[in-house]
Image (spheres, rainbow, N blue to C red):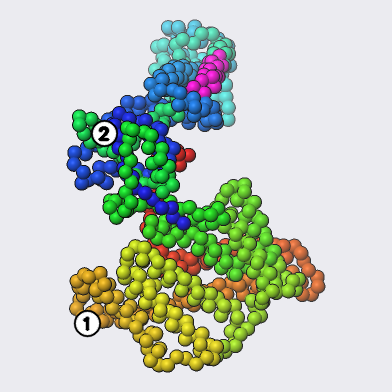
Amino acid sequence: MIEKMKFLNLTGPKAQIDRVAEEYLSKYDIQLENALSELHAVKDLRPFNETNPYRSECKRAEELMQELQGERTAGSSDGASALTVEQAAEIIRSMDQTLTELTAKKEDLEKQVEELVDYRNQAAPFAGLNYDVSRILQFKCIKFRFGRIEKEYFEKFETFVYDAIDTILFECRQDENYVWLVYFVPAPVADKVDAIYASMHFERLFLPDDFQGTPTEICRNLDERIASAKAAIQETESQIHRTLEEQKGRLLNACRKLLQYSKNFDIRKLAACTNRDDHTFFILCGWMTDQDAARLQKELESDEDLFLIMEPDHDNVLSKPPTKMKNPKLFKPFEMFIQMYGLPDYKEIDPTILIGITYSFLFGFMFGDVGQGLCLLIGGALLYRVKKMNLAAIISCCGFFSTIFGFLFGSIFGFEDVIDAMWLRPGKAITALPFIGKLNTVFIITVALGMGIIVMTMILNIINGLRGHDTEKTWFDTNGAAGLVFYLSLIAVIVLFMTGKPLPASIVLIIMFGIPLLLLFFKEPLTSLVEKKSAAIEGGKGMFVVQGFFELFEVMLSYFSNTLSFVRVGAFAVSHAAMMEVVLMLAGYESGNTNWIVVVFGNLFVCGMEGLIVGIQVLRLEYYELFSRFYKGTGRPFKPYGKTASN
């Protein structure tokens, strides 16, 4: 069902707009509309030109709320209301300054650790050098080079080159690929020796000038400094956590206050201002349910500064009423299917209950089995209870109807000799029909069921047409009154023929079929005539006749194809029974040596695969055979400011 809406205008002193938002609008569901657009005919209206003075504090408050993800239960709404917005902003600024200083300290320490680790990585490869690095760095007449060379070239260098040049080489460390070393050379021949080393792919490395001691001592000293810096980082992180923990109550109250204030301030974007007797007033416009509007009106009676006007006629309102659905708890999960297709227009019928009943019923018919139905019923209910998934609740409802049809068909986990069929066996029930011959009874029933559903959707389309004051849709449409009379006449003739009853006289048949077809053919001129508008025939009379003929042919073809589309319901009922027979045959049930593992996995396979296919096919029937006849789904959702919006 769709809740009835009221459009209201709320007026009061401009300075009290925040009080109105806090005391009234935050307690009710109201969808605000742009007052300047809604009241465009009113003179001397202007928008609010104020900017939020606490925008930066509000942004920082949102960031702090994210840091307190697991602590949002701290604080209280009463604590937040006790604060003024200035006090809340000061709490945020103070906390922000403290956390910024601690964060900057942590970042400096982390940068220091990176530098120390880099220094250590430079010194570590030369740990084998048991000599004070600072003394080497002070050599004047002897040149020195720290670096590394690939192991392959180092072996060649030692074998063929080392003894032939003036150099002293000290190997510090080696791994699978490289040898780290230090070589010394007299200053006069340094350039020549450097060139020889370079030809052997020597990569020079530079050590900082402030290194003191041997590389081993340097690494040990750097490790101590790195550990000390990391400990300082941990202490800073603990200090940040303690600060948040100690102040989380005040912090959350301040965040709530600022966020609520910012939200209230944003109301100004939709409000308008006007002057009267040297005073400035605000005007707010929006939609509320009848119930909430009545409660708000009663509450405002004691507030002398505010004035509320309700607009009873929606035709006098520029914006279209939003759609807020309110359905029984049992059918609420089926709103998921409605939202997938499109919300109903405010003047349309909400098809939630219809789809809840027809979807579950058709699914049960196509998937009739007591055992598998109970599995869907119980499994869906448990999953919905734990996860609150709408699809799980839908599966549970479908499982209930599957269980009922399982009893009617006499099938339990595919076994048809355990319980008697209370109605019929889908694969064995046969009916003889005139002209057609023998046909599976299930197919006849599903076609009749489809006819009934199509008639029902035509009636719903007529109701929607009357609600929307749409003449063509109500009287002359394929699914309107003319189409309904034609289709009912067709059903009556088919039933009389199949049951062997005499058909009406020819003149009666001409009236039954001729008049509705003429109304369908001339629907556009007739609509213009009823609405007292001038009828314009595009393309001339000849084109109008040709186009009308083909449209009538398409209409009659659609009646036939849409009706036969429901045969799939019976086909799946028969195929389900056939698939379970195959499972039992593979399990050796007929021979008496039943393989219960095959039975179990066969049931799981059929339940999963066919259940998914049946669910999709039923949804297709709902969308294409039901909704396409009476439902547009062009409504806009109800998006309230207030408690629902904040939850």
Label 1 Cα crowd, 10 Å radius (few <14 / some 14-19 / many 20+): few
Instruction: Residue at 36% x, 80% y: name it.
Output: 516
Classify mark 2: residues with Cα within 10 Å, few (<14), some (14-19) or many (20+): some
Image position, residue 38 (x, y; %)? 27, 46
Span shown in magenta: 228-251
Is label 1 or label 2 in front? 2
Q: Whole-percent x and y of residue 102? A: 47, 17
What amino acid is found at the position of numbered circle 1 in the picture?
Gly
Q: In the image, residue 395 lies at what x, y percent?
A: 59, 58
Q: Is residue 85 left or right of residue 355?
A: left
What residue lies at 57% left-to-right and 21% top-to-bottom?
Answer: 173
Quickly name the residue at label 2: 281
Task: Point out the tag, 1 or 2, that comes first from the N-terminus.
Answer: 2
Residue 319 forms part of the magenta stretch? no
Q: Which residue is denoted by mark 1 in the rendering?
A: 542
The answer to whether residue 436 is seen in the rendering is no
Find residue 219 and report its image quarter: top right
